[in-house]
Image: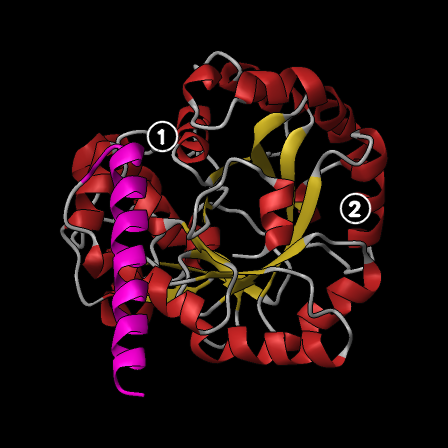
Amino acid sequence: MSKTLQSFFPWIKTPFIISAPMLGASTSRLAVNVSRAGGLGFVAGGTDPASLNKMLNESKQHPFEMFDYPYTNLLQRRGALPIGVGFQLFNSNLELLAPIIASHKPAAVWLFAPKVEEDLRSWATQIREATDGLTRICVQVGSVAEAERSLALAELDFLVLQGSDAGGHGRRQSASIISLVPEVKDRLAVTQKAGVPVLAAGGIADARGVAAALALGADGVVMGTRFLASEEAGIPEGWKRQLVNTGDGGVTTRRSTLCDRLKENHDWPAWYNGRTIRNKGHDDEEGGMGDEENVRLYKEESKRGDSAWGAHGRMVTYSGTGVGLLHSVEPVESIMEKTIRESRHMLEMSYRQAIARL
């Protein structure tokens, strides 16, 4: 793991695991428990300053003194929260949200999906000024070129490289982390940015994915879908049940804009779409159904509660292609402990086997 990341977040364990900021799903309890287990948990900032302020205040109610690292002293000394906040820039108001960030000083802020990439500069600059440099800043990118442009535009502490296997929103056109991570690392070396840590995201759902990402050159990983299937995730039980009952994610999940059209959310920049589990809405669209009727049926289905989830239903079920590796809903602590322990073992065994062949 990068010494830079260790200096930013002194409590983290190897391998470094981040929980993605997922609107409505990433509760303060989920984020805190990821950090408590040696990772860095994120909440989604949303667009409402009052809601964000409430969520960050809630995070302070959790027992930070139970962390392995002496968090109480850290918080008193730095006035910072050991969790991060993620923002979708295209529909977020920096002037309204900056005072909340200044008040709570989260350990990191994750920037994603600006209307124009130049917005990264103003967000990064104002956040650093608002937190006296205590809050670390990362940007989620989906291509080599986007990574280079982001680093040229703003002072960033690390990058999140989101591959095409990721659930939720991402670039319409992108590679998997198999080629994205090493190519970005190569480009950073050429442009004298080799010291910038990179985190791999997309399709990582267990220790095998973590070990593979580290072997590709990542300094850590981001998991989203795996934490959706956690006890702390703030999503309906029907969604969680569908996640653990779905397999063959390369076939059963789809990238499209249907998720946003069903929710009548038309603000996303044109170069993004979302990966969800395929359901009746997709089938009907492919059969010729128009948006108006599909939206009507979606709204009707949403009144059914947990029974509306499943391949037979119409609910928007964000998920990455790694969904087939989820077999149960577990507490965050259990997910983190198992993933860290097993990935360490895999890396150690790989090293021993390599040495034995020399």
Q: Residue at x 68, y 68 (%)?
A: 147
Percent position (x, y) of residue 343?
30, 57
Identity, as a three-letter code, of the amino acid under mark 2: Ala
Identity, as a three-letter code, of the amino acid under mark 1: Gly
Q: Main secondary structure of the magenta part?
A: helix
Percent position (x, y) of residue 35?
46, 33
State how far apart marks 2 and 1 are (Cα): 28 Å
- Crowding at mark 1 (Cα within 10 Å: few <14, some 14-19, many 20+): some
Q: 104 or 190, which is in the foreground?
A: 190
Q: Is residue 211 magenta?
A: no
Percent position (x, y) of residue 356?
25, 81
**In which quadrant of the rendered view does residue 67 lie?**
top left
Which numbered disc flags the more N-terminal residue, 2 or 1? 2
- Camera-nearest label, 2 or 1: 2
Q: Is residue 345 something that shows in the picture? A: yes
> In the rendered view, would you say 233 is above or below 193?
above
Element assignment for label 2: helix
> In the rendered view, would you say 233 is above or below 123?
above
Region rendered in magenta: 329-358
- Crowding at mark 2 (Cα within 10 Å: few <14, some 14-19, many 20+): many
**In which quadrant of the rendered view does residue 333 lie?**
top left
Q: Is residue 317 something that shows in the picture? A: no
Position of the C terminus, as image quadrant, is: bottom left
Name the residue carrying label 2: 124
Q: Residue at x 52, y 70 (%)?
A: 172
Name the residue carrying label 1: 234
> In the rendered view, would you say 252 is above or below 139?
below
Element assignment for label 1: loop
